Image (spheres, rainbow, N blue to C red):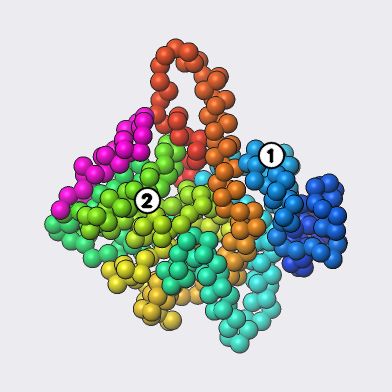
Amino acid sequence: MSAPLVTFDHAPSDAWYPPRREFLSRLLGGAAAAAVLPAGMVAGSEGLSSSPPTGLGESFKNDPVDERYWSMVKDHFPLREDLIVMNAANLCPSPWTVQEAVFGLTRDVDGDPSHANRGKFGDLRDEARALLAGWLGADPEEIVITRNTSEGNNVVISGLRLGPGDEVVIWDQNHPTCSLAWDVGARRHGYMVRRVATPPDPGSEADLIRPFREALSARTRVLAFSHVSNVSGVALPAGKLCELARERGVMTLVDGAQTCGAEALDLHAMGCDFFTGSAHKWPMGPKETGVLYVSRERQDDVWPLIVGIGWGESDAGSKFEALGQRDDARVSAVKEMVEFHEMIGKRQVEERIRALASEVKRQLAARSPRRGSGQRHAGPLRGAFDRLRGDER
């Protein structure tokens, strides 16, 4: 008898269908949970819930440098013990709960692919969309569950009505899908693309905003920029740039591949017209899922890339999500992705990332041969470890 093509020997025996009440137990992990949780909250107790107890949050959850909590979080991933993931900007592993949702729903469809059985995925998708919207500070009617950041960017770039006499201003550190795609669109439709360079060693937000302010003109229709550069790690003040553009009647597209899941986002507060992100990076969600945000005010300004069964114009999802047959299991598992993040806390995640980045930069500066020479460090070094480079979108 031949060996199976795929094995899951690395997975815990109870990984496939765990009761939801055991989620926290697996997150904290047996002995560690007993050491830090209040009595009655250890694995197997009747009081176990799907969210951390109050005592845990008050003790060390809110301390971004306390390794006890974060080692417990890491236990919920199928990572080899000898590995440390250094490129979350490219591809992240998913926690067990997300994997279990994908695998379980996939087996469900493969066991009964009938329309009657698959009908439930409409409700599951809507539930995932609602949670995703709340997590990002948006309304469900403004959220599209895409396949990745690249698709979201291209929906906007290809769908906007632009032509000769129009101009698009982009950051010269944009990812290719928010850079080359504009160039192709310009060749096709005749508008102009203008690239903006920011100072290599900015001293303030004003230094980053100034080049964009000077580039905007009466012809500018769109300002498109990466929230955080995947090349240098420089973070642009997205809210202020969106405000600047809005005052001039310019639409904004924010490529959030390096901030979605890494920062505590509020898209309504940011004030962007369009925002894109991928689930396979910092959100640690199902592979080949992503998000496109289209503000209510701009949904009539964008033509869909694909029109098919289920197409409509009542909201962003119905207008831009008619992509044909989807992997319903992956789309539905976006719900577990958001729930996992919310259990940890999106502000705690951001503080943890910033604390680690600051420590890396501190140690690099301390060990730099330039230390004490009076020379300033090269600009990209200041932000390079805020986000490690990721090239696949």
State if disc 1 and disc 2 touch (CB < 8 Å): no
Residue 128 within the magenta-colored segment of the rendering: no
Name the spot of residue 133 as percent of width and height, x first. Answer: 49, 65
Q: Secondary structure at mark 2?
A: helix
User: Which residue is the site of mark 2?
Assistant: 239
- The residue most toward the bottom is 116
Q: Is residue 84 visible?
A: no
Name the spot of residue 69 as percent of width and height, x first. Answer: 71, 45
Q: Secondary structure at mark 1?
A: loop
Q: Please give left or right for residue 38 compared with residue 258 in the image.
A: right
Residue at (85%, 58%) from the top-left corner? 40
Give the quarter of the image for residue 210.
Answer: top left
Q: Amino acid at mark 1?
A: Asp
Residue at (30%, 41%) from the top-left corner? 209
| Magenta span | 191-218
Q: Quadrant of the N terminus?
A: bottom right
Q: What is the total number of numbered labels drawn onto the structure image? A: 2
Q: Amino acid at mark 2?
A: Gly
Q: Please give left or right for residue 169 compared with residue 108 in the image.
A: left
- Name which of mark 2 and mark 1 comes first in the sequence: 1
User: Which is nearer the eye, 307 or 3?
Assistant: 307
Name the spot of residue 108 as percent of width and height, x first. Answer: 67, 76
Q: Is residue 212 visible?
A: yes
User: Which is nearer the eye, 154 or 74?
Assistant: 74
Q: Please give left or right for residue 34 compared with residue 145 in the image.
A: right
User: Which residue is the site of mark 1?
Assistant: 66
Query: Distance from label 2 to label 1 (Cα)?
Result: 31 Å
Badge 2: residue crowd in 10 Å (few <14, some 14–19, many ≥20): some
- The residue most toward the left is 165
